Image (cartoon, helix red, strand yellow):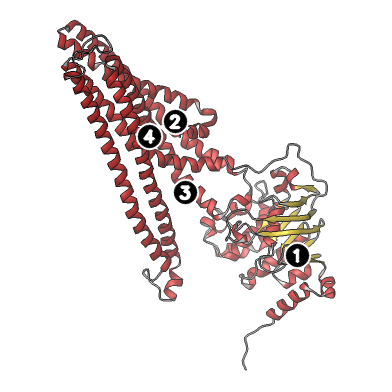
Amino acid sequence: MIRGFLRILGPQRGLMFGYLAWVGAYGVLHGVAMVLLVPISQALFDGRYADAARWLAVLAAVVVAAAVAQYVQSSRAMRMALATMRLLHRRLGDHMVTLPLGWFRRDTVGSVSQIAVKGTTFVGTSGAHLITPIVLNTVSAATVVIGLALFDWRIAAVALVGGLILMACGALAARLIAGAEMLNHDAEVEVNTRVVEFARCQPVLRAFGRTGADFAPLSTALDAQHRVGRRALWRSVAGLMLNGVAVQAVFSALIGAGAWLAVGGGASEATGNGAELNPLTAVAILGLAARFASPLAALAEYGSAMRMARTELDRITDILDTPALPEPDSPQSVSIPGRVELDHVGFSYPGPAGQSEATGGGGRVVATDISFVAEPGTMTALVGPSGSGKTTLTRLIARFYDTDTGTVRVGGVDVRDQRTTDLMAQLSLVFQDVYLFDDTLWENVRIGRPGATDAEIAAAAETAGLTSVLQRLPDGWQTRVGEGGSALSGGERQRVSISRALLKDAPIVLFDEATSALDPENERYVAESIRTLAQRSTVIVIAHKLSTVTAADTIVVLSGTGEVADTGSHAELMARGGQYADFWAQRVAASGWAMGVG
C-alpha cells in the first residue's frame, strides 16, 4: 500500500517518508510510555520512592514528546492526504492523454469515472486515517515486546509468538471481510446499473406493459444481490469471530505464562534484569502484555479496510501502469500533406471476446490485408457490409490503435513515426457518436480551433447549418448545451461536430456519414458539408447515402473477410459488376420503396 502511495506521489514522495518517520516515532514513544509502568511499579513495591519519582519524570517527558509527535504526524498525514488527492487527478489526467484512443472503451471510461469520483477520495483519506493506526499499532506492539524482553524474556517470547499468531489470524480475517466487501461491491454495481437502465427505459417498458417485477434484468440483479449479501454476511461474521477468539487466546496464554512464572516455575528464577519476578511486577508485566494485545486486535480490525483501500489503489496504479502510446524518438516530418495510405494492413481488436466493433473490443480479426490510397484533395468513400471494418480503418488512420501488420501512412509518413500532436493536427474527425461539453454552443464549436476569429466561427456554423438551430435556442450562441449535448437533437449535435471540422480546416477529414437516422433537413446539411470539406481537404467518408458514393473520386469496397474487394470510381465499379454492383442494386431498390394506395 505504501509503495502505491509512493507511486502516486512521485517527486513529492518526501511527504510520505517524513510522515512515516513521525508516525513511527509516535509509535515508539507510545510503546515506551507503556513499558515505563513496569519500573515505576517495581520501585513503588520496593519502597524506592526517589527512583519511582525519577521514572515518573521520564514518563512525563515521554508523554510530552508523544503529544508533540502525534500533532506533527497528524498534520503531516493531512498534508499527504491532500497532496495525494490533488496529484491523483493530475497524474491520471496527464497519463490518460498519452494512452491510445482505443483504450477509452465504455468499460474503461466507466472505471475511470468511478476512480476519479470515489477512488481518489477513498485512497486520499485512507492515507490519513488508515496508515496512521496501522503503523502506530505495529510499532507500539513491537516496542512493547522489546520492553517485555528487558524484564522477562520468557513472557516476551510468548508475546512474540502470540503476536505472530494474531497477525496471521488477522490477515485471514481481513481476507474474509474484504472478500465479503468485494462480493457486495460487485453486486451493488450490477444493481445500480440495472436501476439506472430501468429508469431510462421507462418509455419502452411502459409501451409494452412491463413493470419493475417484470423487468427480468433488474429482478435477476436484486436476487443475486440478496444471495451475495447472505454469503458476504457469513464471511464477515467468520472473520470477526476469528479475530476475537485469537485475541482472547493470546491474552489468556500471556496470563497463564505470567501466573506460572510468578507463583510456580518463575518465582525463584532470576529475571532478565537480575531481579526475581515478584507478584506485583508480574501484575505490571501482565498489564503491559494486555496492552500489547490491544494494538494487534486493532490491526486485525483495520485489515479489511486496508485491503479495500489497497484494491482501490491497485485500480489507480493499474491505469498509471498502462503503457502509453509509443512516441517516436526521432519524429519524421510530413512529406506529402493530405495523403493517406494503407499498405497491407491487418488488425484484430484486443480484449475479451463477445464485444462489438463499436466498443473497441472482441478480439476478432477485422482486417487481414487492406491496401488503398487517398490522394490529396480527393474524396474516398468506404462501402461494405456491417462489420467489414469501415469504422476500424478510420480509427487506425487516427491511430486509436496500432496495426498488427502492415503500415498506415498519413502525409506520406508512417503514423508510428509521427508525434501524436503532429498526427492529430492533420486530421479532423466527424464520427457518429458526437460528444458536446456542458458549455455554451459557441465554446463547443470553438474547440475546433481555439484561436479562430468570431467571423471564422460564424462562417463554419453557417456552412454546417447551425444558424437555424441558433434561432430556436433561448440564449443563442451562449446557450449551454448540457452534458453530452442533451439540449440538442442528434442531427444538431452532428452539425456542431461538422462545424468543428470546418473550423479546424485540417488537410484530412475522416467522416462517418451517419445519415440513416437524420431527418431530411439535417441530412441535407450533412451532405452539403461533405461537399464543402471535399473542396479543400482529403475526405475519407464511410458512405451510406447513394449521392455521397457517386460523388466520391474513389470507392473502396470492403468485403466481410477483412480485405478490399474492389477499388475504383462508380462508373468503373459498375462496369466490372461484382460485389459493388450488387450493393448498388440493393441500395437503389431500397430507396425506391414508397407508401401508396392500391
- Identity of the residue furthest to the front in this view: 265
Please report whichever mark, 3 or 1, sits nearer to the chain's N-terminal start: 3
In percent of width and height, residue 344 lies at 78, 56
Q: Tell me the number on the disc at residue 114.
A: 3
Q: CA distance from mark 1 to mark 4?
A: 59 Å
According to the picture, the residue beneath numbered tag 1 turns out to be 381
CA–CA distance between discs 2 and 3?
22 Å
Looking at the image, which residue is at 51% across and 55% down? 483
Q: Amino acid at mark 3?
A: Gln
Residue pictured at 38% horizontal, 44% vertical:
178
Residue 586 is situated, as x and y percent measured from the top left of the image, at 71, 78
Looking at numbered disc 1 in the image, what kind of residue is underneath it? Ala
Q: Count of labels shown?
A: 4
Q: Earlier in the sequence, mark 1 or mark 4?
A: 4
Give x and y (percent) for residue 292: 28, 26
For label 1, count other residues whose C-alpha is less than 10 Å away and answer few (under 14), some (14-19) or many (20+): many
Cα separation, mark 1 vs mark 2, equals 55 Å
Q: Whole-Å distance between the Cαs marked 2 and 4? A: 12 Å
For discs 2 and 4, the disc positioned in front in the rendered view: 4
Residue located beneath label 2 in the image: 80
Q: Earlier in the sequence, mark 3 or mark 4?
A: 3
Q: Mark on residue 267? A: none
Instruction: Name which residue type carries label 2.
Output: Met
Above or below residue 344? Residue 176 is above
- Of marks 3 and 4, the one in the foreground: 4
SS at circle 4: loop
Q: Which residue is mark 4?
A: 130
